[in-house]
Amino acid sequence: MYFDKNLRICLDPGHGGSDNGATWGCVEEDDINLSVGFYLQYELQLAGFQNIEMTREKDVYVALQRRVEIASCYDAELFISIHCDSFHDKKVHGQAAWVSNTASGNSFLIAGAINKEFAKRFPGHKKRGIHHADFTVLRQYRPAVLVECEFLSNPETRKFLKEPENQRGIALCVKNAVTWYAERQ
């Protein structure tokens, strides 16, 4: 099926630098996010997408508003923020996608496609569905989705997130969803 290989995509590996995000033991969220971001950039390029911008490509702090500005300056047509979740209850687990409280229909399309891809590739992981929030990176740019890859606070899913093949698998899920979305534009 044909898709627009010129779709401008902005990838946002969450946190970075002095903002590590969730930290459990020696595992810091910003490192996982950046790794998944690089895998996703690579997989999108392999699929033929030619216009991919990253909000950060190393372990540096990038303010939330700056992330939105990067996407706007790039004139991105799709914004994907990559994160890991955490919770005080270490038993909680699952994968989810977040959209803005005022999300466009296209944000829901890509979020739903990501959830479907997670269900196919990782059937043993709980699917937490699509959630709404007023996150800065979502409310100011559309279509946009924030992906929660799994919970760092859960010892089993933290082990899952640390494995490069699982990071690449997460990236493949998002790449498949983006390809599906691009085919329908």
Image (tube, rainbow, N blue to C red):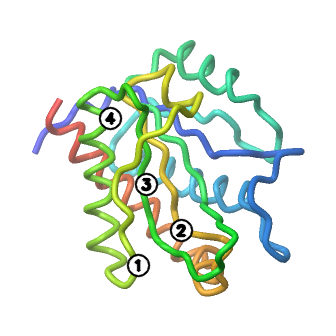
Q: Are marks 2 and 4 in contact (CB under 8 Å)?
A: no
The residue under label 4 is which amino acid type?
Ser
Label 2: element kind: strand
On the image, the x and y values in percent for residue 82 come to: 56, 49
Q: Are marks 1 and 2 in contact (CB under 8 Å)?
A: yes
Residue 43 bears which disc, if any?
3
Q: Are marks 3 and 1 in contact (CB under 8 Å)?
A: no
- Read off the residue under disc 1: 125
Q: CA distance from mark 2 to mark 3?
A: 20 Å
Q: Quick one: label 3, few (<14), some, or many (20+) residues within 10 Å?
A: some
Going from N to C along the chain, the mark reached first, 2 or 3, is 3
On the image, the x and y values in percent for residue 101 come to: 41, 31
The residue under label 3 is which amino acid type?
Glu
- Read off the residue under disc 4: 107
Residue 120 vertical placement versus 133 (above, below): below
Residue at the image point whose x is 39% and y is 61% from the top:
172
Q: CA distance from mark 1 to mark 2?
A: 9 Å
Q: CA distance from mark 1 to mark 4?
A: 23 Å
Q: CA distance from mark 3 to mark 1?
A: 22 Å
Viewer-nearest of discs 3 and 1: 1
Going from N to C along the chain, the mark reached first, 3 or 4, is 3
Tally the marks: 4
Going from N to C along the chain, the mark reached first, 2 or 4, is 4
